[in-house]
Image (cartoon, rainbow, N blue to C red):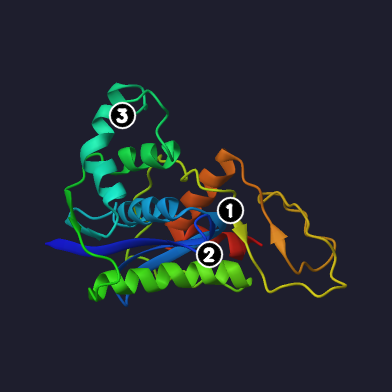
Amino acid sequence: MTITAAADGSALGNPGPAGWSWYVDDNAWAAGGWKHATNNIGELTAVLELFRSTAHLDEDLLILCDSQYVINSVTKWMPGWKRKGWRKGDGKPVMNLELIQELDAAIAGRRYRFEWVKGHAGHPLNEAADERARAAAEAYQRGRPVPSGPGFPGAGTAVTDAAAPAAPASTVAAPPAAASAPPKTQLSLFDDEPAAEPLRAVTVQLSADEHARLSRSARAQGISVDEALRRLI
């Protein structure tokens, strides 16, 4: 059996509020994003999260993608980058290196192929992924809850050692605070001590270890990292 899924990213302003999404059908999709990122980060993360969400399956994966940058990065350029110590042909460092390296780890041993589709041309799966990625970006822009989706059935049964993608610091945006609201508070995700007062808006800076732990917890629950972060807060 082949799983066919679309993966897409969106950035309002590029860089700006950004989102990612992969979509199989209405019962299997996921989305997330950041307050500030680029479209390429969204595109790469969508594909990375698709691989992670299907890691528990022994199925072929067909990825519909409208980003030639992502397709070429994975299928053409990555082997050369690795041989050159993750540098491009001109000697400059590879852009979005952490995400590229996470993708390199995620695709190991997987059976997959990419198919380029033209964006905004009416392809139903691509349009569904684009719609959800943009909705995530708009949610961050407006300070609203991010629609994260149901994820993939059974996801989280396989635990990998891959670290979280090196996107901007994870931030969960709540509805805009009133003028008299207290300032934002920095929290450690894994402290047991509750906040001294209710929070209107929370910004969480994650270390690499914390982000990896959060990712593992999210996969175990079959939810997105953003949803796991909101539940912790």
Residue at horizontal 21%, vertical 38%? 76
Q: State the SS at label 1.
A: loop
- Tell me the quarter of the image containing the N terminus: bottom left
Q: Is residue 126 above or below residue 67?
A: below
How crowded is the residue under tag 3: few (<14 C-alpha within 10 Å), some, or many (20+)?
A: some
Instruction: Write the residue at 21% across / 45% down.
Output: 110
Spot occupied by residue 214 in the image (x, y as percentages of width and height): 54, 51
Left or right, residue 191 beside residue 113: right
User: What amino acid is found at the position of numbered circle 3 in the picture?
Assistant: Trp
How many discs mark residues in the rendered view?
A: 3
- Which residue, given by chain and number where applicable, does mark 1 sit on? 170
Whether pointer 3 and pointer 2 mark residues with C-beta atoms closer than 8 Å, the reply is no
Q: Name the residue under label 3.
A: 81
Q: Out of 208 and 222, give the one closest to the viewer.
A: 208
Q: Name the residue under label 2.
A: 227
Label 1 or label 2, whichever comes before in sequence order? 1
Label 3 or label 1, whichever comes before in sequence order:
3
Nearer the observer, disc 3 or disc 1? 3
Q: How far is the residue under mark 3 from the one under mark 1?
A: 27 Å
